Structures are given as C-alpha cells and as structure tokens.
Image (cartoon, grey):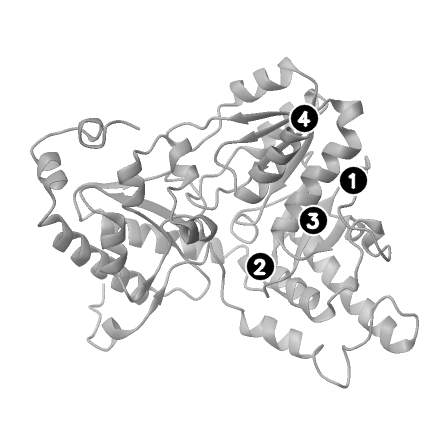
Amino acid sequence: MNSPTSADRERQVYLDNAATTPLDPRVRERMLDWLGTETGYANPASTHAPGRQAAMAVERARAEVAALIGAAEDEIVWTSGATEANNLAIFGAARAHGERRGRRIITLRSEHKSVLEPCRQLAREGYDLVELPVAADGSLDLAQLEAALQEARTCLVAVAAVNNETGVRQPLTEIATLARRHGALLHVDAVQAAGRVPLDVAGDIDLLALSAHKLYGPKGVGALYVRRRPRVRLQPLLFGGGQEGGLRPGTVAVHQVVGMGEACRLARELMDSEPRQLAQLRQRRWSGLQQLDGVVMHGRSDGAPHILNVGFIGVHGEALAAELPRLAASASSACTSAQGAMSHVLRAMGVPEQLAHASLRLSLGRFTTEQEIDLAVEWITAAVDRLRAFSPVWRRWRAGASLDIMYGGA
C-alpha cells in the first residue's frame, strides 16, 4: 500500500457514486455531437430529414439500454429519471391492473423513497399496502413475501435489485417466481444494480427502472422497461402528444437519451471487468477500516461491489462529518441526508439510531483509485480516533458494554 503524500492529503476524494456518478468523458463526447447547430436540434417526432436523423439517434440509444438488461427495443420507455420511472411503473400498474389482479401492493420497508412514497399514496387512495420488514442484514424473508401474496390478491410487488444505502442484493429470481405464481406483477428498481451486477428481464420481471446519472450518464434522463410479451399495460401519468407509445408524452431530449445510450453501451462493454475492480476496491476499503475496533458493516459482505455502509461505535455522526471536510460521502441516501433524518433503511434493519447517525455510506465508481481509498481510510481512521478520545460511549463499549445497553436497543 503506497503512503499518501502531503499533496494527496489536500485533495478532495469522491466516494458518493451511489448518489450520482461523474459524467464519463466518452458519454460527454457523444452528447456534444447532438448539441451543436449542425445536427441534433431537430424534434425526433418530425418527419423531415433532420427529424428522422434525430429519431434514428434516439432509437440507437434505446437499443443500447435494452441490450444492457436483455430487453427488446420496443420495451424501453424514456423518462426524466428513475423517480419518474418508478412512479410510472407503480401508479401505472396499480391503476391499470388493480381491479383484475387485486388491489394489494407489496414492497419493502427499506426501499428508496421513490418507491415507498408512490405506494403510500396508493394506500391513501384505498389500495392495500404491505411493507415487508427486512432482516438485520437487509435481506428479504421469502416466506414472508409468500405469506403476503397468499393473504390477498396482489397487483404488484415492487423491490430494488440493490439497496441504494447498503448495497444489499435481493433474490430477484425467487421473488419473480413467487410473484408469477400468485398472479402479481414484479417491478424492479435497478438503479444501483445496472452496470454493477448482471440484469436480465427475461426472468419474469415485468417492469424495471433505470437512471442515467447513476451510470456515468447525464442527469435528467432515465428509462422504464415495460414487458410487451405478455403485455403489461400501464395507465400514463402524463397526457399530451402521444410519444413513447402514449406512456410518456413530450419531446424527447435527443442529447440526453444519446448520453444514456452511450452510458449503457459502456456498462455492457465493461461488465466483465468493472464489477470485479469495484469489488477489489471495496475489499481494500473494508480491510483498512477493520483496523479500527468497533466498526460495524450494515448489510452483507456479498452485496453490490460499489457500496459499503459502516457504523463507528462511540462517534457522533455530525462530528464525524465535520472531521472529514475533504471526503465526499453520504450518511445515507442523498435525499435523506438533505433532510438530516435517520436513514429509514438502517431503521428497517434495526440499527440503533445513534449508531445509524454515526454511519457512512462509501460508494465507489469507475474513476475511484486505490490511492483515494487509502486516503479515505486514513482520514476516517484519524477522525474516529480523535472523536473517540472524548467519547464516554466508546469507553463503555471498550469496557464490555453491549450495543443494546449503550444505545437503548434498536
């Protein structure tokens, strides 16, 4: 392990790739091709030559997104991002299929807010919502899912392939089998999975959300996979010009979808090598942090390769953040961090509130280096050591007190 230099220690280290990834220069170049005055300005719905040229670029990008997840081109619907894709999937499926399939919706307490909040809005509209608990390691108990499916006719099961805060992977194949057996549709939030773990919608996934900016593409564009065979019908959220098969009207932003298409092409090209590199960096980071005593991993060691969520016993979260001014990391998801609230994901896993507030999500990306990992570990170690020197909680833990005694239980 190379020792960081004094110049290194003055730099900023970005370990918040689960919140957003930097734009890959290759993606930027493809987007610039469609931002000039020579090409790219035409409306892809227009029938003249510039419009047809723009439409061809849109369809090439659609094919790249489809290829990343094993879908057909006509099963990809452009959206403004994963929040819209999740909303379209959940509201659209519930309102189109609720009467025939049943008005129950099943999700997990640890889901992203862009899944939980649409589900809760449907509950306010009279749908039967079941939010299943997760285990202490963040995993779903399949027996509980099957019991919920058996209790009532279910329209939709909504689950993330990879949790955005802990990197925990859910067993999509088994979940899909149960949903299909009981006549329910399955929607997968694949935002943190795409490009990091293999995805194939052929395994009975009906709907799947993607976001470009979590995949080294631009912000402001995403996609929703909608199964065509057998056809999954959705009620649209927006009404207008009929674009995207009537599911998402509005002029398609050519440069944005071209950027997402290139990001997906690169992800597919790098699928054999990049996750392996991320896993090696994740292990390097975890091995370094384990040199500190009293460090807790939230999640599972077999999670997605880019996310590590760790808690530091005997440390106050705000003080820890103040001690790390050059480390860009999250206390939870970016949405929750902005509100200063305890992570609902860690709460669902039974993590005590004080420990949850003393936790960091460190998420790696394509451009993260070993040197940056070593710097982050050095900074965190020094900050935790400084704070623990004044911590009565740390002294009690070192004296043998349990977490339940110190933190009052989960």
Mark 2 burial class by Cα count in 10 Å: few <14, some 14-19, many 20+: many
**N-terminal-most mark, 4 or 3:** 4
Residues under numbered marks 2 and 4 in contact, where contact means CB atoms less than 8 Å apart: no
Q: Secondary structure at mark 2?
A: helix
State which mark lies toward you, 2 or 4: 4
The amino acid sitting under disc 4 is Tyr
User: Element under label 4?
Assistant: loop
Q: CA distance from mark 4 to mark 1?
A: 16 Å
**Residue to which mark 2 is pinned:** 267
Instruction: Inspect the image, locate mark 2, and give the three-letter code of the amino acid beneath it.
Output: Ala
Residue 234, numbered circle:
1
Q: Nearer the viewer, mark 4 or mark 1?
A: 4
Residue corresponding to mark 3: 224
Q: Can see residue 387?
A: yes
Residue type at the position of mark 3? Leu
Quarter where residue 377 is shown: bottom left
Badge 4 crowding class, 10 Å Cα cut-off, few under 14, some 14 to 19, many 20 or more, is: some
Tag of residue 127: 4
Q: CA distance from mark 4 to mark 3?
A: 23 Å
Nearer to the camera, 238 or 305: 238
Q: Check contact, mark 4 vs mark 3: CB within 8 A.
A: no
Label 2 to label 3, Cα distance in Å? 17 Å
Nearer mark to the viewer, of 1 and 2? 1
Classify mark 3: helix, strand or loop: strand
